[in-house]
Image (spheres, rainbow, N blue to C red):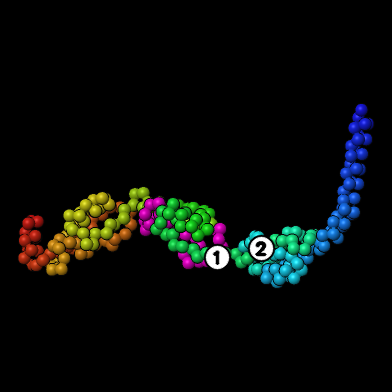
Amino acid sequence: MLKKIINFTIALLVSSLLIFIIFDWLIMPIYIRKGNSVVVMNLQGKDARKALKQLESEGFKGEIFDTLYTSKFDPETIIDQYPVSGSKVKRGRTVRLKVAQQEKMVIVPSLVGQSRRSAEISLQQIGLNIDTVYTEYNPDHQKGTVAWQFPKFGNQIKKGYGLQLTISMGLPPDFFQVPQLYGLSLNNAKKQLANAKFSLGKVSYQQNEDLIPYTVLDQSIKYGTVLDESTKIDLVVSILDLQDIFDKLQSEK
C-alpha cells in the first residue's frame, strides 16, 4: 500500500513538472509572439521623469503608485517597479513605479509650559511623538507642565521622530516659594502670604496718587524666590498723601 502511494506521488510530481515545462517553453513563447510582447526594461536607479518618458517611448504606460521617504536614495529616483525588469508583457501594459523622496522635515514646536496631554496633541498634529518622559521638581514651572524638551523649539527634525520631555513636579516638598504681591491690595497680599505659608513683616508707606490706596508697590523678597524655611516679608504700599500716612501710623499704635 505504501509503495503505491509513493509511486503515485512521484508520478504526480513528474507530471506537474512536465506541464510546467511545456507551458513555460512552448505555450508562453507562442502566446508572447502572438501578443506582440516585449521585455520590461530595468528602471531602478533612474530619474522618475526620464523613466516615465522611456516607458512611453517603448509603448508602456508608466504610473507612480508609491513613495518612500528616505535618505538612502536620491530624491525622484526609481527604487522598485512592477512588473519587474526582465518580465515579458504585452505593449501597452502599465508599469507601476516606486519613487524615493527626501525625508519630510518638521519644525519642533515650543512645548514648555504646556501640559503633557497638550504637548502630545501638538506633536501628533505635525507627525511627531513623545519618546521619553522624565520628571523633576521645578519651582519655575507648574506641576504637570513641560519644563524642558529635546530637541529644542525651532529645530528641524524628521517626521516621526520622538521628543524627550521633562515634566515638572512643582515645588519640592518642605520648600517655600515667594508669591507675586506687586499690584495687590494689602488685604489680598496678606492672604497670598498666608496661602504660601509666609507671614507679613514690616509695612512701609509711600505716597502715590496714581494708585488706589494700600496697593503693594514692592516686597522685600523677590517673587519666585524659593526658600527652605518660612520667613517674614516686608511690604511697601501706596497711600495718597502724608496726612494719610500719619493717620495710618497713629491707628496702628
State the SS at label 2: strand
Residue 188 in magenta stretch:
no
Dot 1 surroundings within 10 Å: few (below 14), some, or many (20 or more)? some
Residue extent of the magenta highlight: 136-161
**In the drawing, what numbered circle is on residue 105?**
1
Q: Residue at x 75, y 71 (%)?
A: 57
- Residue 212 circle label: none
Gap between marks 2 and 1 measured at Cα: 22 Å
Q: Can you see residue 202?
A: no
**In front of the other: 67 or 15:** 15
Q: Name the amino acid type tagged 1.
A: Met
- Camera sees residue 117: yes
Query: Which residue lies at the image location 76% right of the left edge and 60% below the top edge?
Result: 84
In the rendering, at what x and y percent does residue 72 appear?
67, 65
What percent of the width, then of the height, locates residue 56? 72, 69
Residue at label 2?
64
Q: Point out the image quarter for the N terminus.
A: top right
- Between 100 and 9, the one nearer to me in the picture: 9
Q: Is residue 235 left or right of residue 223?
A: left
Q: Is residue 53 above or below residue 214?
A: below
> Within 10 Å of the Cα at label 2, are there few (<14), some (14-19), or many (20+) other Cα atoms?
some
Query: Is residue 151 shown above or below 175?
Result: below
Instruction: Work out whether residue 91 or residue 175 is closer to the camera in this orientation and state it.
Output: 91
Q: Position of residue 109 (x, y in %)?
A: 46, 62
Quarter of image, res 3: top right
The residue sitting at 46% across, 54% down in the picture is 121
Instruction: Tell me the quarter of the picture where residue 202 sits.
Output: bottom left
Instruction: Name above or below for residue 3 compared with residue 240.
Output: above
Q: Quadrant of residue 147?
A: bottom left
Q: Amino acid at mark 2?
A: Ile
Describe the element under mark 1 as helix, strand or loop.
strand
